[in-house]
Image: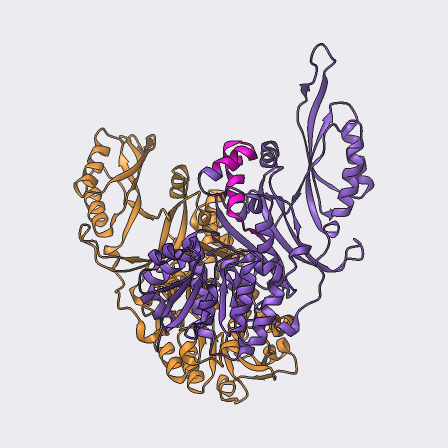
Chain colours: A purple, B orange
Amino acid sequence: MNPIQVGLLGIGVVGSGTFNVLRRNQEEIKRRAGRGIEITMVADLDVARAQSLVGPDVKVVNDARAVIANPDIDIVIELIGGYGIAKTLVLEAIAAGKHVVTANKALLAVHGTEIFAAASKKGVMVAFEAAVAGGIPIIKALREGLTANRIEWIAGIINGTTNFILSEMRDKGINFDVALKQAQALGYAEADPTFDIEGVDAAHKVTIMSAIAFGIPVQFDKAYVEGITKLGAADIKYAEQLGYRIKLLGITKRRELDAAQHTSAGVELRVHPCLVPAKRLIANVEGAMNAVMVQADAVGTTLYYGKGAGSEPTASAVIADLVDITRLHTADAAQRVPHLAFQPNAMSDLPVLPMSEVVTSYYLRLRVADEAGVLAKVTGILASLSISIDAVLQREADEVGGQGGVVQIAQTDVIILTHDCVEAKMNAAIGLMQALPTVLEPITRIRKEELA
Amino acid sequence: MNPIQVGLLGIGVVGSGTFNVLRRNQEEIKRRAGRGIEITMVADLDVARAQSLVGPDVKVVNDARAVIANPDIDIVIELIGGYGIAKTLVLEAIAAGKHVVTANKALLAVHGTEIFAAASKKGVMVAFEAAVAGGIPIIKALREGLTANRIEWIAGIINGTTNFILSEMRDKGINFDVALKQAQALGYAEADPTFDIEGVDAAHKVTIMSAIAFGIPVQFDKAYVEGITKLGAADIKYAEQLGYRIKLLGITKRRELDAAQHTSAGVELRVHPCLVPAKRLIANVEGAMNAVMVQADAVGTTLYYGKGAGSEPTASAVIADLVDITRLHTADAAQRVPHLAFQPNAMSDLPVLPMSEVVTSYYLRLRVADEAGVLAKVTGILASLSISIDAVLQREADEVGGQGGVVQIAQTDVIILTHDCVEAKMNAAIGLMQALPTVLEPITRIRKEELA
């Protein structure tokens, strides 16, 4: 059988990794797929550079549409990125009857519903293993490996840049700004790191996993997104003393109606720094590595760990998609793995809950005047809202202020861990506590998940 | 579309879990598979018990052949276990044109080649996700998720019973016999625990993974199998002091020809207790949990963690196979995922290496007379065979012996960690060291893997 021909749009870091791995392991891949898989045409704005990467046997053009128009090409890989021209080209490739492989999480998290509908209508596949957690086959695990299960929640370290920064902050006791500079110097963070450190990249990925886990449309606009830029070394240290690590997690959770707690049924979809018990395996995922924990009713907890980015790890996922398409393109379209795990006519209308309806536990740090009765007032406010306390850590007082003979104020940190409550209630409690004259600085609130 | 009909052979722990999960999550599964999946017929020797488990709507018979002969049934699940009647029935089901799902690792590790050949000839699928690591979708990860890669090695905690026992031995400082009794009392070990504690169960599983990773036939008879029955609390404690944990690992590794080291090309296939650096994620897999680490050229290290046994975790894997078959049975047989990951006509003839040709590093514990020059003699033997030493731990001397006025002999433990060497060389070294008059007891040798 002739090799299946693949066109590549954009030959940057992941594109060249894909080309190299496909060529280096071509025999091994053919022995698995039963058919050769070859990139025969590449589109890139820098034609000369692209040609030097792929050699003289591969046709290189600067016009992506020439690849899409090539009738010998069955699969188009989109590695351009972003929502702009990438979206247009993916839709054009689908319209031309090509199967599409993409690593573009931003595109799918925002426009996935439209793209998958177009693909289903045309009878082609859009595969995107590389869009979430790089080389870890998490999309396959969720869509195929766990099909027996009702998935309850997913919590993932799905951004290597921020996990590297948090690991450095903890290891070295340094602040965010210093750790970011180190990450940039080492190539773990980009010159403009906004998408990573503000949690946007992780939110794209958890949006896609949420859709697959619960059979809901991708709804990036409903995701709560909070990054790591405000985390201080002190909170990391206090968390450690209480037996926790702070990780940036992408979390999505199915929530039933709970009349007693006044919470609605729906799906939580959120990215934020999170305290995790230090003994959990995921708390020990260090550096730029990724890991995704999945809780499901039959299998219980499973965890998937590996490199979430980089040239060849991401290429590994792109090529796995190429092999899948090579295998599946002869199957009845109705029998293929659905794009979002559930058949398009069997999607759920479970709403994504607003952050105020999320239920979680909390780490609170209050900078207070060291006076009698402060703790009683604070805990009284929590009790009045039926928020129960799991642990309190009170530091010895520091003497601060007092320049030029002014009276010094003794201050101290009070750290409170709470049990689960609805975020709206916690917002109210923080408002009341913040209004106390003895609470001297803005209260730090970090969410906490036991992941048990 | 009508539901796909499934026949179940054997309704024990996993069978009833499969029936229950399939029924409980039937809507969710149908939304994913695009078609209902129903167990409509069950064969079990205890018909009354089986009927009470499945209710009146499912036909229950005591003759498995009646299930196989039922023309309405497309898929047969074999959950009988063992090599005997299970083999006959699987082959008969294949001959009758049924797809087969099995959790029977023993059957596949020993007779897999014959069974897969029969299935390929008949054009049916034999699916076996549940045979390795229970609910963890590791077969899918290896066969489909990592198709881009040249796999280098796999190391797995793939027997929950022994991992539970080792966790207890370390946590509580107890010996093997005590920990085994606790595991039996808690239901983690069977009344006859031989297959688990002697490493046979793990060897069945790593044999299957080895075939899938390297495209070689299943060759259980070539596997090296060593259990945990001889491990002592002292070795676990010494390992801890050196920064290691002891785990029972199933290991399979691709080895290139190395003329300098006089080692041949081939595949290592072995189960034995193993020192693993305590900081590795896999070293922190505790209790009855399973985890499989895979090293591959493009993706690097990935790890898959979850429950390796139990009713519903195993059912999760069985049902994932049912969904896969429901999806794939309309695809060209040539395009399906090959049973052993590689096309039957593209298998490798890489030999499984004998244990004497395995390359690894070692932990050695020698009980020696506390005399000057002992360490020099021991290290001299290692040096003479070009075995290099990574670390030495020498304990303070104990006074032992000396009953009834007999002269006491001061004894001590010397622990040596070596760098990599060929096992044949280590065997020679141990022989020479054992012959030293100052070495007082049989030398303890535990292999060590850095898993870096």
Q: Main secondary structure of the magenta part?
A: helix
Pick whichever, A128 or B117, lies toward us.
A128
> Can the viewer see residue B90 in this picture?
yes
Q: Which residues are magenta?
A: A156-182
Name the outermost residue toward the right.
A384
Residue B168, image x, y percentages:
49, 48
Residue A425, image x, y percentages:
78, 45
Q: Is residue A167 magenta?
A: yes
> Can the viewer see residue B401 in this picture?
no
Q: Quadrant of the N terminus of chain B?
A: bottom right
Residue A438, image x, y percentages:
78, 27
Pick whichever, B77 or B345, lies toward us.
B345
At x 61% / y 71%, what residue is drawn? A117
Residue B269, above or below A447: below
**Quarter location, residue B57:** bottom right
Seen in the image, is B282 located left or right of residue A380? Answer: left
At x 52% / y 85%, what residue is drawn? B67
